Image: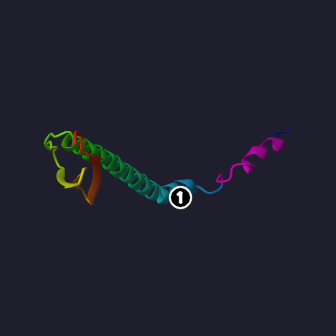
């Protein structure tokens, strides 16, 4: 009866491979960390792009009602007007250069 209780050892895949799981984990771990870091970096750039879009729209809104451009750190703004349209282009220097443009109609004309 005791000999029949050893059936569970056959279910363990790595029971006879001492250290194989650890070695495979150590080979795979840097790739997982690198992929996670890349994903977080791209996610961060997406958030900066959304913030830059918001800032460009805010600046275009300020110009369309007759106010001046506001200063926002680490961001450069350029404006141009074409007829009733007021456009603001926002630039931000990161590891890559990001640029967003927002246009609105002038109020009160």
Q: Position of residue 40 (x, y in %)?
A: 38, 50
Image quarter in which the N terminus is found: top right
- Residue 61: image quadrant is top left
The image quarter containing residue 30 is bottom left
Task: Measuring from the top left, give residue 34's x and y in whole percent.
Answer: 41, 57
Q: Name the image colouring.
A: rainbow
Based on the picture, tell me whether residue 8 belongs to the magenta stretch. Answer: yes
Image location of residue 18, percent across then percent down: 58, 55
Which residues are drawn in magenta? Answer: 3-15
Residue ID at (68%, 53%): 13
Q: Decide whether the magenta segment is chiefly helix, strand or loop.
A: helix
Specify whether 26 is left or right of 50: right
> Mark 1 Cα within 10 Å, few/some/many (few <14, many 20+)?
few
Side (left or right) of 60 relative to 42:
left
Nearest the eye: 86 or 107: 107
In screen coordinates, is 18 left or right of 94? Answer: right
User: Nearest the camera: 62 or 66?
Assistant: 66
Label count reads 1
Q: Residue at x 55, y 55 (%)?
A: 19
Residue placed at 17% from the left, 52% from the top? 76
Image location (x, y in percent) of residue 47: 34, 46
Residue sitting nearer the eye, 49 or 37:
49
From the image, tell me which residue sits under label 1.
24
């Amino acid at each position: 009866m005791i000999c029949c209780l050893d059936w569970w050892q056959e279910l363990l895949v790595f029971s006879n491979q001492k250290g194989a799981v650890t070695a495979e984990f150590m080979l795979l771990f840097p790739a997982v960390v690198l992929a996670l870091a890349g994903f977080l970096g791209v996610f961060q750039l997406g958030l900066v792009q959304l913030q830059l879009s918001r800032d460009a729209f805010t600046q275009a809104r300020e110009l369309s009602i007759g106010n001046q451009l506001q200063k926002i750190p680490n961001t450069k703004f350029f404006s141009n007007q074409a007829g009733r349209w007021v456009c603001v282009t926002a630039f931000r220097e990161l590891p890559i250069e990001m640029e967003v443009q927002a246009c609105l109609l002038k109020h009160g004309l």
